[in-house]
Image: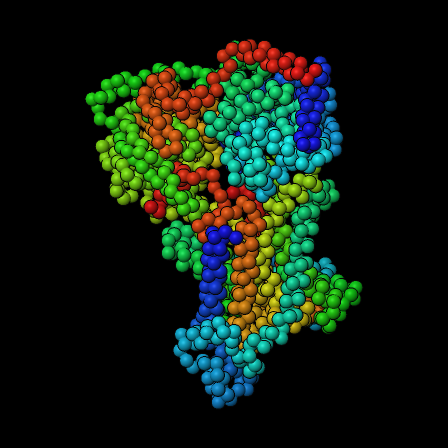
Amino acid sequence: MSNAYLTYAAKRLGQAVVVILLAYVFTFVVVSILPGDPITSVLRNPQNGFSEQEIAEIIAAQGLDKPVPVQLWNALSGFLTGDLGMSMRSNRPVSTLIAEVLPSTLILAGAGLAVALVLAMLVAYGTRFVPKKYGQGLLRGFPSLFLSVPNFVIGLVLIHLFGFQLGLFRVINPDSFWATLFAAVALGIPVSAQIAEVLIANLDKEAEQEYATVARSRGIGQLKLFIRHLLKPASLPVVTVIALTIGELLGGSLITETVFGRTGVGSLVQRSVSTQDLPVLQAIVSLGAVVFVLVNLIADLLYPLLDPRVKILGGAKRRPTTTDEPSLGSAKAVNP
Amino acid sequence: MSFVSNSPLSGTANTGRLTALRMPATVALSFAIIAIILAWSLAPQFFTTYSPVVGVPADKFLGPSFSHWFGTDHLGRDLYARVVYGTASSVSSALVAVVIGVLFGGLIGLLAGFLGGWVDVVLARLVDVLLSIPKFLLAVIVVTAIGFETINAAIATGVSAVAFFARVTRSEVIKTRQATFVEASYLSGGSRWYILLRHVLPNASRSVLPLAVLQFGESILIIASLAFLGYGDPPPASDWGLLISIGKDYLKWPWLVYAPAFVTIVTVLSVNRISRWLRKTD
Amino acid sequence: MASQDRLNTHLSAVKTSTLEAPRPAPLLRAKNLSVSYGANQVVRDVSFELGRGKSLALIGESGSGKSTIARAVLRLLPDAGHATGHVDFDGQDVLSLPERQFRPLRGRAIGFVPQDPGNSLNPVRTIGVQAMEAAALTDEPNAAVRKALILDTFAQVGLDNPLRVYDSYPHQLSGGMLQRVLIGLAVLPRPALLVADEPTSALDVTIQKRILDLLTRLQHDLDISLLLITHDLAIASERADQLVVLKDGAVQEAGKTSAVFSAPSSAYARKLHADVPALNPERYAGLRNPGFRLLDGAASTPAKIEVKSVTKTFTVDGKALTAVDDVSFAVPAGTTHALVGESGSGKTTTIRLLLGLDEPDIGNISVAGEDLSGRSHKQLRSVWRHLQLVYQNPFTSLDPTWTVERLVREPLDRFKVGTPAERTAQVREALANVGLGDHLLSRKPAALSGGQRQRVAIARSLVLKPDVIVLDEPTSALDVSVQADIVEVLLSLQAKLGLTYVFVSHDLALVRQLAHTVSVMQRGRIVEHGRVTDIFDNPQNAYTATLLESIPSGLSNPSQQAPQRQAVRAERREAFA
């Protein structure tokens, strides 16, 4: 733990806090400033059967009669103290609603990430060992194929094959082990395609590096070359990629829960969208941003500790350079 | 390694132009598929005689055959006709999304990368914020705010892509700005804005093009997901995602899911293949 | 102590076993070796023999297939490469052996020293971990002995602090140190053959010489055969018993060094010899003479460029680094002034200051009587009208999206010189001046060879008809034969147009041929300056002398080393008998 590292960590932490707050403000602006005034239009929808007095009460309770900056200030201070406001439909605290469905989604997302990692490693590391004539091409085609498949289609295919044809699980009972497993597979496959794509590209790049040839000139076989030389430099950058796919997992679980008929944050989003329950939506989107920012913060803080090539200098992460004087053609000139 | 290092010296002198045009068979096939898809969206009536809206109730749930390539749905409508007529909406909305993402993202990235200083700091924070909200959630909340329509889904998808293009363009601009040929132009008397327009922009856009193509494929997927959740135009529209969504309620007749899914996958695969080829030939 | 004994036994055992072997057949013999990548044949029917304890150099320019041959011998060609013919190593046909049987030979019997030390060690593993791979090839069971063996080898290749090197990551060491490490790892298992692929081309001249000396010493001490791959005829003839000259994958000439070097029979070998600056000091004498005449009358005319006690300090990672320290020089009009130094000597910063791209902290620079200090971009433009630059690397200095015509025309358009029709004529004239035809006007840089690109870059800097051109290592990215053409173009332009050049280079042999005055830089300071002839013939500064000694000069009398080498070998045999 050098001083430089601590400075860097403090700086990154500060940035993360700022980004989270701004993300909250951004979602607030999107739902309150954009045209259409969905809130009152929903409340006034005769199907919902609110009387004028009830509407006025709800508007007052939500603070919607106040000017937008005041609303923002109230919402932001609530967010900072953990108060996510009240649902407009069920009249229950948003935090309670989310807490009810969160465990199921966390299990799904966690299982999905596990599936994604295992699959990505099998596929990517497999390309190093499966010879060309025994289907290395299939492994290499995996990422581009599954990056082209809509994730709900994967879910539907699994349900059709394993639920309907093989009868392995009942779609009606989504809490069974098999149903959860297949939901996780459906969620994990597109994410694994992303990770595998980067991993394969990194492995190919490292294998082409001069040091790999030089290591082979010391009589090293393919297995040792892979384990001792390629594995670490090719896999390390993937830490950052995994952190970036967290967003994919959160968005994907929304669809997967719908496909598999599971209750969870995704189904809560679905319900809130159809009823225009904006406080719930805003809370979920902001929490999504919090999770995403925190996971990426951890990845960023971890990375310099894992990769000796990356040095922390002057509070910023950078790769060490060999030239210590500016060269010609580095064009600082254009912005003198 | 002399083989590798020598190629730019001797090999390319005569063959540069030829190799640029020589394309692998899979890429040619991808272009052919995209041509068919574009033809479907421009003139669907030339590709099928069936109506996408009116069905023959007696013919419902027919499996794929010579008269009904993709079978028929629960109202006896020809599924192939529905897919063909739904193409225009799926393709054009994806285009709208790409244009929004590339234009706004590109502009932000260009300004941030070229002006630097506080402009860069402010815009970089803005991009960080946009990136921090999971893409699909961002699209969902935007489409919720502006209303459930396919065009709005396209706008939402475009907004969710702005941050990505801003970041890519910024790093490309910074990379190009530091290129030796930019300093050379500066020494030849070029002003900053001249260099930005004549040197930095053409070079940066060369690497952004394949990503824009890639984004086209991804937009098709995201818009299909939004349609699948019911955030696009309602039936009798026949966007690909909506068709799959309807099909999921009739899994006993699986072609209702597999046929539109197949068309979606083949289209996106082709687009991605072209993008990869563009990146390589660059 | 026990481990020390085992170490000694190990060392002597290996040596005696190789020394006592009878040596009738050559160690390495390539016969009709061809290598192709798909339809592209890069090596054609190459044959050569390398005897035990001897050295052989494969010489050629880029694209000659020399590195491909090295890799074919080690069977380390990329997947797409396909080798045919025969490569016999110690009686076994390398190309037809199954990988399982060939792999034990790699490292143990055939060592490899790569070209670019900076990329040749795994960046995320310590040197020690990678050294252990080499040590494992000795079959020494005890890990402590293996480590001692490594440290011993590191000391042997001239690394001062072996233990520190052992624990370092590659990026913590300099290029020269890394190359020593790599050579150490290659010789540690005591191979019979060492393949060195351009082992010094990525290093500074003084380090280059030391690394080559080290290789030669190890080759003699350990009785290793050396297959040296190089583009440098001078280095090859200094270091090898036999030469094989390659061009486009085919052998042009082969034979004893003395024969090939002093009396090349093939046209290509003769041209190669004639193009190496170190071997032909007087090649451009006629073209350079006008400058010397100007220099003799220089006292009366004012200098075109005057740099007066300039200092520039950068802050790198919180530390102040004085890149240029109290540097002064003046260049009379129509002559060439060379800035010479190794990487980090401050020569690049000096010309950035000279061009107004950076501002000096202290000191004055004037070009053609105009003072550079405190000028804005707009005011600098009027200076650049008369002062242009040619970059080192023509692969990065030309915008890849532009055509040749647009590239050369750009300065005219920017400075609004003449009418559009006149500009078109001037572009053609500038291209003609550098020997390029009109048919290239519509080409983009990717469709040009390296030499053509550098000519375009020179044409671009010429088109404004400037008085001064700064040349930043203008030929170092190019092959020798291309370099000779470019130098000829530059010198004839100087004679024709009376240009003043500031020539930056690390290649002293080249400087000696084309500059009139020279400043030698070391760590930001000018350590010696004056007329080229005075300084090169009679250097006063120790550093200048070292630089000059490092110029490979070719083997003037190749036979004188051979007996000496045999004597060393005989001595060793006695010692172990």
Q: Who is closer to the viewer here, B3 or B94?
A: B3
Q: Does residue B116 appear in the picture of this structure?
A: yes
Q: Does residue C65 appear in the picture of this structure?
A: no
Q: Who is closer to the viewer here, C7 or A41?
A: C7
The image shows residue C66 at horizontal and vertical percentages of: 58, 25
Q: Residue furthest front?
A: C1
Q: Residue at x 64, y 18 (%)?
A: C53
Compared to residue A35, the image places residue A207 above or below, namely: above
Q: Residue at x 73, y 20 (%)?
A: C91
Q: Quadrant of residue B268?
A: bottom right
The image shows residue C332 at horizontal and vertical percentages of: 27, 25
Q: Who is closer to the viewer here, C389 or B143?
A: C389
Q: Residue at x 52, y 73 (%)?
A: A82
* Quadrant where the image shows the C terminus of chain C: top right
* Quadrant where the image shows the N terminus of chain C: top right
The image shows residue A287 at horizontal and vertical percentages of: 54, 68
